[in-house]
Amino acid sequence: MDRTLFCAAAFAAACAPAWAQEKGGNAFNPGISLILQGTAATSKEDPAAYRIDGFAPSGGEVGPAPRGFGLGESELVVSANVDPYFRGHFVVALTPENEAEVEEAYFQTLALGRGFTLKGGRFLSGIGYQNEIHQHAWDFQDAPLAYKAFLGGRLNDDGVQLRWVAPTDLFLELGAELGNGRAFPATERNRNGANAASLLAHLGGDIGTGTAWRAGLSHLRARPDGRDFDAQSFTGTSRLWIADFVLKWAPNGNATATNFKLQGEYFRRKESGSLTNDDGTVLTGDFASRQSGWYLQGAWQFMPRWRAGLRFDRLDHGTVENSPLVSEHNPSRVTVMIDWSGTEFSRLRLQLASDKSRAGVTDNQAVLQYVLSLGAHGAHRF
Amino acid sequence: MRFLMALALATLSWPALAALSIFACTPEWAALAQEIGGDRVSVTAATSALQDPHHIEARPSLIARARRADLVFCNGAELEAGWLPLVLGQSGNPAIQPGQRGYFEAASAARLIELPERVDRAMGDVHAAGNPHLHLDPRNVARVAKALATRLSALDAQGAALYAEREAAFQKRWGDASARWEREARPLQGLPLVVHHKNLSYLIAWLGMREVGALEPKPGLPPSAAHLAGLLTSLQRVPAKAVVRAAYNDPRAADWLGQQSGLPSISLPYTVGGSARATDLFGLYEDTIARLLGVAR
């Protein structure tokens, strides 16, 4: 006999204690946390004029930290179970320009079963590895160049996501997303249906007691219509593939004193379609591009509280046909960082970068950053 | 495609022999689940005795294991607050979500001590529900065993008689062993100790020992040079007999203080698997008491 039904029908009070919610669970208040961030930065070149030469502008906020003192985004996170069927999650970023920006506002199912989880709303896409990680949890102050060039920093579309975890010892997860295409590389198109779609697959597991890994493959397909491109706009198809991996090691799997994290991603994009000048004339010849990029980074906690990190970024201009505005430049960057975490709730970081995003120019950047989190315990995402 | 099929087949496991698949968050609760469930359950522990249970990540292998679990048996009292919600959320397994029958916290059946009067992170890593390291009081283990047997029976009615029988047998052996440990540990009464983290408080309270200092300036903060120097000075006024730490705690601070003060610095298994003798819950307690008796003389 189904004991739940039995209890619900007749003996609710007598049965409840057997699997009642543990004590200490707060009384229906959502978990609330607040992230405070700020920077003090210097750079040789003007951050406001930052661009990644050789690549179409992605429209995101991809520039380095502003010179002098700067306030980062303050993030307010509210999350709780709605009922036995749904969980709600809301992240609003308050920008230094005094604007509120909804970063995430989604529901997630709890009761679909058989390994399925459905998400809906606005959420960080599951493509790649770093895309799903909030900026305050990154190992460097800013995004890899590949994320800046191919996704405008990150992808958080409005739409739905379905994920399935396989019933295997080896972690295998498959997912699909449909989105409105509200941001690069897609555009909103005032039509019925989805304007962007992605597929993703993740594999992961442990090696011995000390090492854990995850590898993934993702594909994003979008059909932008009139995407701004300096004085031109692009209409056509954009296909992006991402291969990612992350490997974490700690002695005996105990990351408290020392640990090491290695992460890398490879992006490859194919776009084809047509370019239109702002005056309405269509450029002769079909536009087509094949571009790629990768980064590899490591973060090493060499003693309690202290970590050092090194990151290599490289973008390959590839082939771009019939686009007079894109220069033939292969951007690259080397970044080093050292950070100190008083607890898992506070982090101070010094980061230095030699950035060759612009053709013929080396920009030397230095940034001091703080990241503090208040309130509900944050998640230790892998 | 053929390769993928082969891979899928190779990694599919068939838990047909065990009626219940249990995902235990810590080794002590994995050991207890095995005591009560016997061959009727298959148990996996998410962490080892050498890992700090506060600082675990929601790594892929944990999500894969939670996906197939019938019961998540965790410590609770916020010990797993940093990683368990993510694992549960990503598992796609409705049976093990908080509030369901397949979710059970040891803390819900135990008596907790050191409940903070107010909770402020300026006080370090304090837990609102009380000190979560509750398994080093054998009376808590007995309480949790009873509640666990009830829960297993609710999940697997066909095994109810077996669980009840195994629980009764365990309670008998555990009760006898606890009485013996209390007798053997009589010389430990009043034993002054310096601890690394407040993860031995239940043991100290049960055996009537005294904590006269902690290597961590505040719970969860790593020992600092200034704090250790202060501790060394205070040990001249309030002497201790030993510096004790759990197997997963970094030994350097305890060893440094031991050398400076001339006190023995010892590692306690803390949980099942934390030493060669701590192969089950009985071995855990026996080895712990033997090691403490070694420094009490």
Image (cartoon, rainbow, N blue to C red):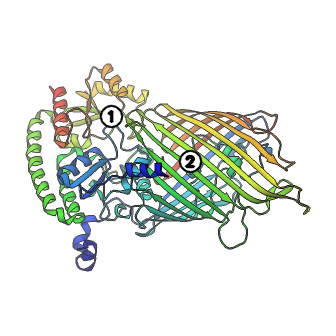
Identify residue for label 1: B196
Identify residue for label 2: A129
A21 vs A341, left or right, is: left
Q: x, y (%) of residue B200?
A: 27, 40
Q: Nearer the viewer, residue B244 or A199?
A: A199
Residue B276 numbered mark, or none: none
Identified at 34% across, 51% down, the residue is: B116
B179 vs B45, left or right, is: left
- Asked whether the viewer can see residue B240, the reply is no
Q: Nearer the viewer, residue A100 or B41?
A: B41
Chain ID for label 1? B
Q: x, y (%) of residue B206?
A: 18, 43
Disc 2 crowd rating (10 Å Cα; few below 14, some 14-19, many 20+) is many
Q: Quadrant of residue B103?
A: bottom left
Q: Nearer the viewer, residue A58 or A88?
A: A58
Please name the amino acid that badge 2 sits on. Tyr
B223 vs A58, left or right, is: left
Work out which quarter of the rendered image holds the C terminus of chain B and state it: top left
Please name the amino acid that badge 1 sits on. His
Q: CA distance from mark 1 to mark 2?
A: 36 Å
Mark count: 2
**Do residues under tags 1 and 2 come within 8 Å of each other at their CB atoms?**
no
Q: Is residue B158 above or below residue B5?
A: below
Chain ID for label 2? A
Identified at 59% across, 48% down, the residue is: A135
Q: Is residue A93 above or below residue A259?
A: below
Mark 1: which secondary structure? loop
